[in-house]
Image (spheres, rainbow, N blue to C red):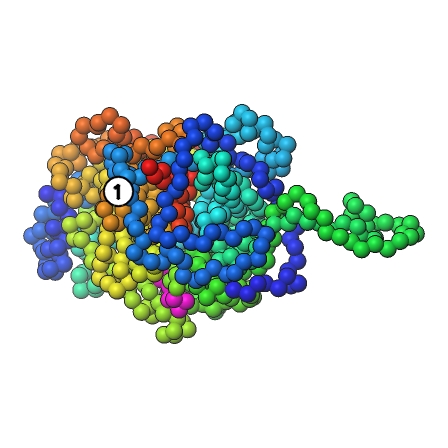
Amino acid sequence: MFARGLKRKCVDQEEDGEGTLAGFSTIPSYSLQRQSLLDMSLVKLQLCHMLVEPNLCRSVLIANTVRQIQEEMTRDGVGRGAAPQSTGRAPLDRLVSTEILCRTVRGPEAGVPASDLGDGPLPGPPPGLCTADSAEEPRSPHSSLWETDSPRENRGSFHKSLDQIFETLEHKSSSSMEDLFSDMDSSYYDLDTVLTGMMTSVKPGLCDGLEGFPAAAPPPASTCKSDLAELEHVVEILVET
Amino acid sequence: MHQPPPASCSRSSCCVCARVGVRVSALAPAAAPCPAPSRSLGPRPPEPPSRGTSTLPLAPLGPWCSPTGSPAPLSCETGCGEGSWILVCRLLVPTQVSLLSMEEDIDTRKINNSFLRDHSYATEADIISTVEFNHTGELLATGDKGGRVVIFQREQESKNQVHRRGEYNVYSTFQSHEPEFDYLKSLEIEEKINKIRWLPQQNAAYFLLSTNDKTVKLWKVSERDKRPEGYNLKDEEGRLRDPATITTLRVPVLRPMDLMVEATPRRVFANAHTYHINSISVNSDYETYMSADDLRINLWNFEITNQSFNIVDIKPANMEELTEVITAAEFHPHHCNTFVYSSSKGTIRLCDMRASALCDRHTKFFEEPEDPSNRSFFSEIISSISDVKFSHSGRYIMTRDYLTVKVWDLNMENRPIETYQVHDYLRSKLCSLYENDCIFDKFECVWNGSDSVIMTGSYNNFFRMFDRNTKRDVTLEASRENSKPRAILKPRKVCVGGKRRKDEISVDSLDFSKKILHTAWHPSENIIAVAATNNLYIFQDKVN
């Protein structure tokens, strides 16, 4: 049921695997967990780009993962329901990941002096554009992305709360940041079985995934009202403190 | 390589001298004398030149180059193999504090063994970040996050102390890199030593390259056992004498003194890397070396510090298109025109500098087709290569990715000839390892002297060895609790699901904060050095 490998094969072989795709996109737990993986990656990228000189290898790998997830979501019609297939790669390449990655690496790059050996004057925006207002800029692309794609109403409100988390993060010390993420420690364990489980002989049932999920601390893409309320509560606490 | 002209170098004030013969390791007791002549693999190299005498340069082709060397047997899983590994000594990189007080404290430490500190006292700066034997195996260098280089020297063999063989003692310690601040980019440059590479020994002195994220330095480590005495204008303490009191002239003489080892920086290769240097590699012509960062590889001449050649540049014009970075690079051990570099996409490129000065186009491209049944969102991350090493023979390349170590034949580009699973049980944990960032850990890998065994690290202070001939593998643990000096290391086993047997450790109880990223194998003998946080373990193959 969760054999993503099988599904990919279908997609690769024939472009319109409509029946299969539709079948898979109806499985909530997989797409939810894929969404939370995406959110986790975006948070990582966000934290990366707060650093002046992040580990480039790590940020590139995370950004590629984000890209991969988003491409798959587009294919599945989950990520961008309205996106016309004919536009092909052009819109994909300008997804969130690229924006954030570009900011991540351009930050230090923009400040590179001309003394850098073998490096001509670098094209790119002036440093002020990159460093100023680090919180708002990258978010606008994906907020629009997320708000248009979501068939559900509460998506927007969720995204707002994620925004608040980011804002809070930026004004908090690193220790409070760690606190926030330490809550999530165990939340992705059940993702393991679903997202990487297809190569193990025992495939987790749908129920396992669903059972495990509500236990996860802040499941970002959860449609459950109570979870959202909880999230708002967390944000409130963070804002207050 | 030419000897750097001494006249052009001023001695730096930051060199620290360590007394020779000071024993810092205290873990190898005289009890349980067990003769442990280490097995030599294939023909032995010429004896390391005795210190203090001028020696010929080592032949570029080491004796270990013959791939026909007898395979070194590995301990099998039951521990009853032909050979087993014993702990020779556990060394701690001395901290700054103990350096200052080394002379007075060392004797008491020897007596009560309390020099070995606990894990909990280790500071971030003490964490070992690289380990490297020199070409004879006589010296072993470590670099740490605090920017220090500590060189250990193998204890001289003596007839009545056979059991002491294989022990390494502190030879020299110096501060190689200091934390810096780049005012133009407004960023801190860590002092952490990313890599150390020894130059082949050409005279009594030793030379090594050490690098942090941005700057490579060439260090000379030499011994001094004589000092000039009897100056006319200075007294014995170095104070100037009143010229009026000088009534006679004398000839200054060199008098023997206690042996001192001093480290002096001879060259500083700076300002050539925008990104973080991940590898340095000395060319087999001994005149050049390369340094690789995330996006570029530079070629340097040892004599020239103010310019380097950029031989690889994968930086896209538009950084938004960046999807791949360089993760490691190394020169071929014998062909000075050939080098390889690995990428975050799991590929290896072999370049020939004869083809063009700019090696942006590769000569060979090693890539394994992806197994569709193993695809996941983490496929690319776990296939990112963390280390690449040529075999001593130059015929094979070994690469380490997150879960496996692979051996490639230079003559076959489409798939590796051997793939070894290092810790396949982590495959089901990738999401949590992604979450806690362990998935980005950079494990290194090494060959043994005859290219028949490969070694690499894992979590929980485990390290793995794979015998390429017998296809046997073993998991060993470098820990203070579980290894007594001279005791045979017990192979460890990780249990995957189901019932856990005695002596097995379950995947869930692995400690992911204890990781073995850096190991080194003696160039000709079965002696290995394993860095576990701030501890350096030296193990030796106990034969018979």
Query: As drawn, which residue projects farthest toward the left?
Result: A19
For the question of whether residue B424 can be seen, the reply is yes
For the residue marked with disc 1, what is the amino acid? Asp
Question: Magenta span has A42?
Answer: no
Q: Is residue A60 above or below residue A187?
A: below
Q: Chain of mark 1?
A: B
Q: Residues within 10 Å of mark 1 (few under 14, many from 20)?
A: many
Chain part drawn in magenta: B335-342
Q: Is residue B160 above or below residue A42?
A: above
For the question of whether residue B521 can be seen, the reply is no
Q: Residue at x 35, y 32 (%)?
A: B488
Q: Nearer the viewer, residue B324 or A69?
A: B324
Q: Nearer the viewer, residue A166 or B525?
A: B525
Q: Nearer the viewer, residue A178 or B437?
A: B437
Q: Percent position (x, y) of residue B325? A: 36, 58
Question: Magenta span has B336?
Answer: yes
Q: Residue at x 31, y 32 (%)?
A: B490
Q: Nearer the viewer, residue B272 or B134?
A: B134
Locate residue A102: give its quadrant. Answer: bottom left
Q: Is residue B101 above or below residue B454?
A: above
Q: Main secondary structure of the magenta part?
A: strand
Q: Which residue is mark 1?
A: B473
Q: Percent position (x, y) of residue B421? A: 24, 45
